[in-house]
Amino acid sequence: MKKYYINIGLILSAVLFLIIFTSLKENNKQSIPMALEGPSILQDDEALQLMATLCFTCHNPDMTTTHEQRLAPPMFKVREHYYNDDVSRADFIAKVTAFVQNPSKEASRMPGAIRNFGLMPKPFFKESDVKKIAAYMYDNDLSSEAWHVQWQKLQNKQ
Ligand code: HEC
């Protein structure tokens, strides 16, 4: 009979321990993504997927690709020519979208890229898609290690 009580006690404390342990773990789970979420929205898989499908055939982010194999400058280079500390998000989106929807020498900020690759061919993309991609380009530093990790993750999912 005594042995029985001891066992119950053991089981009860094991259960209590498990409850405390899992609730601590849950708390940790919640605090980690909050700590990682900065001003940039690295988790926008939809926009990244759109950019991969519509833009990366030419604007390949893979830096091991040689110049001869490229059809266009990598996207982080494009971003550098449109992004600076003074440009507003709305203005950035408007400028990038305007160029993509109607590429022209006059609107270009990358004359060197036009010399190297020729003017970007006029694509037929939904404006709402291009805006999503442009917003994503504004929010994310495409030359950063963090972004490359995100891009790798998306590729591994496919
Ligand atoms: C068929 C190939 C191709 C595709 C697809 C493509 N681009 Fe380009 N893009 C180019 C080339 C080539 C250039 C460099 C020449 C130029 O600037 O026009 C360029 C340049 C650009 C520039 C810089 C323009 C400048 O000169 O200031 C922007 C912005 C841009 N692309 C955005 C995009 C976005 C966003 C997408 C996807 C929605 C995309 N491109 C898809 C070929 C492409």
Image: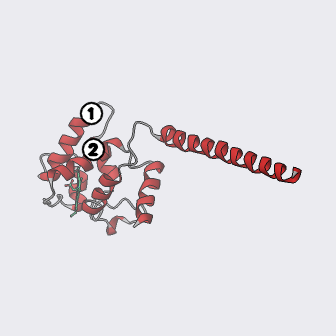
Q: Which badge, 2 or 1, is on the more N-terminal residue?
A: 1
- Residue 62: image location, x then y, percent: 40, 62
Question: Nearer the observer, disc 2 or disc 1?
Answer: 2
User: 17 and 130: which one is in front?
Assistant: 17
Above or below, comparing residue 5 to residue 84 in the picture: below
Query: From this viewpoint, is residue 108 visible?
Result: no
Q: How far across and down, in percent of the image, does residue 80 sit?
A: 32, 44
The amino acid sitting under disc 1 is: Val
Left or right of 49? Residue 154 is: right
Q: Label 2 belongs to which residue?
A: 135
Camera-nearest residue between 152 and 86: 152
Q: Secondary structure at mark 1?
A: loop
Q: Nearer the viewer, residue 44 or 74?
A: 44
Write down the quadrant of residue 39 in the picture: top left
Quadrant of residue 121 within the rendered picture: bottom left
Q: Residue furthest right?
A: 2
Q: Is residue 136 left or right of residue 25?
A: left
Q: Residue at x 20, y 56 (%)?
A: 114
Residue at the top extreme, as displayed: 86
Element type where label 2 sits in the image: helix
Numbered label attached to residue 87:
1
Can you tell me which quadrant of the image ligand 1 is in? bottom left
Q: Residue at x 41, y 49 (%)?
A: 143
Please report the residue visible at 55 percent of the width from the left and 44 percent of the height from the top: 29
Q: Nearer the viewer, residue 138 or 155?
A: 155
Q: Is the residue marked by circle 2 packed among few (<14), some (14-19), or many (20+) residues within 10 Å?
A: many
Query: Residue 70 location, x and y as percent?
Result: 31, 65
Q: Is residue 77 above or below residue 58?
A: above
Q: What's the mark number on residue 63?
A: none
- Residue type, numbered disc 2: Ala
Q: Is residue 143 visible?
A: yes
